[in-house]
Image (cartoon, rainbow, N blue to C red):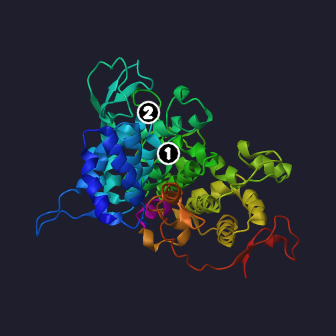
Amino acid sequence: MEAQLKELLPFLRDKNPQVRQIALTNLLPQTPQDAPHRNIFFASQSNGLKKAEENAVVRDLKLLCRDQLAVAHDAFKALVNLSDSPLLVSSLSETPFLVFLVSYIINPQSILADLASMLLSNLTASAGACSIVIAMKVKVITSPKVSNGFYATECRSGTCPDPVPYPQGEERNVLALPLLLDAFVQGANVEEINDLSKRPRKGSLHFLASVFANLASSSAGRDFFSTPRPPNFLQSEGNVEFPIAKVISFTEHKNIIRRGGVASTIKNFSFNARAHRALLTPEATSVSIPPSKATAPGVGALPYLLLPLAGPEELDLDVQEKLPETLQFLPPDKIREPDEAIRLILIEILLLLCHTRWGRDYLRGTGVYEILRTAHEVESVEKISEHIERLVQLIQGDEPPASEALNEEEEYDALPTDSLPPETRLIQGLGFPGSGQDLSALAQKQLGISSADEVAEEEEEELVIEPLGAESEDDDDDDKIVEV
């Protein structure tokens, strides 16, 4: 059987598209991790001490991603399945191919943009691909006659036709990440339009959320998300905003891939303690992120972090007044975030924001404790309950002298990841952990890839929250956390 499959490999380069399609259709079932003959895609071409050449099969699959629809669909799918292997990461992460992927994704007319996003998500799990994407520039031609105002010239393929008429003007190189962010925002609700021809974008691009989470796991990625930029690259003058502000609102999106990846992005971004003030400050106030002095409207992230944790419980009027406006008087059918992995990430973000004295004081004054108390009462996952208890202890506990907290923002971003407790570690790799599978596993389940190993959990102290207003022998001890 393996010998017969190997005989199909040369037909991936056949001039007849039907022959290429038949060959790829028969080879595709061997690309998942548990396929019996997957090794045919990993044939080494090294010769002695000579540097190994690029795998011919992988090179053919990369070229077939530009083919007509049926062939390109299977080629993308095959590479998504194969991209979990470290043996192919360097070949798939070459700059020309990554530039094609990004250019293809940002084009609204790309039919297979979602598969390309899955592939980019898997590839950016590696540091090499991350660094390339963060610094990447793509060639575009700006034109008001194109649907989104520009055309990325390096996206040409059979599933991404050139605009008619072709835009006139000179190509210019622009940073790719802002364009990916805009495409991600535009794809948020395209699935609600049943008629594909009427969609502003052909793909929903939910998997870009995990790409952003991967990029934000590096200091260079966090720097990008914390550097004020114009909302539209076509308008370089005028108002600016922090790029992280574009993804904040998706923590309650109906798609689990999107909202989970966004939560992971915010968590990784929160490792820059200097950015906490900008992350929490409401939009009406301008703020800078040291050491830069450039200012932009605050992100106002707290309502988007708390809303998924809030339920339908009725709170006292004096408590309601402390909450952000969007969390006041929630309807009786309000549902908490159903995915336990995402709930855990949201609590971990709040734990990170408690690193600085300013952050703890801000959370105290905005009703965070009340939301956490009601969430703790109905939480069924022990690990999440423990994290909530630790968070409440930080918010409700006594503060050290002010002099000891002066340099908190300066020290935190330099801490090595492996020295931090479990609730404050960067989310690395393809996405967020959850229920025995990570974010990439949602794509892997669809495409036949095995999920990654779960990270071992460390034991933590057991803490208990006393209900707000509970009776106690000492009134001063109400609402405090006590160790058991």
Q: Is residue 181 left or right of residue 358?
A: left
Q: Position of residue 77 (x, y in %)?
A: 42, 50
* Residue placed most toward the observer, 189 or 160: 160
Asked whether, in this view, residue 261 is left or right of residue 230, the answer is: right
| Relative side of 263 to 167, left or right | right
The verdict on residue 411 being magenta is yes
Q: Could you tell me what secondary structure mostly forms the magenta stretch?
A: helix
Which circle marks residue 230 in the picture?
A: 2
Type of the residue with mark 1: Ile
Stretch of the chain drawn in magenta: 408-415
Pick whichever, 317 or 85, lies toward us: 85
| Residue 408 sits above or below residue 319 on the image | below
Marks 1/2: CA distance? 12 Å
Look at label 2 and name its amino acid: Pro
Residue tagged 1? 244
Horizontal and vertical percent for residue 76?
A: 39, 47
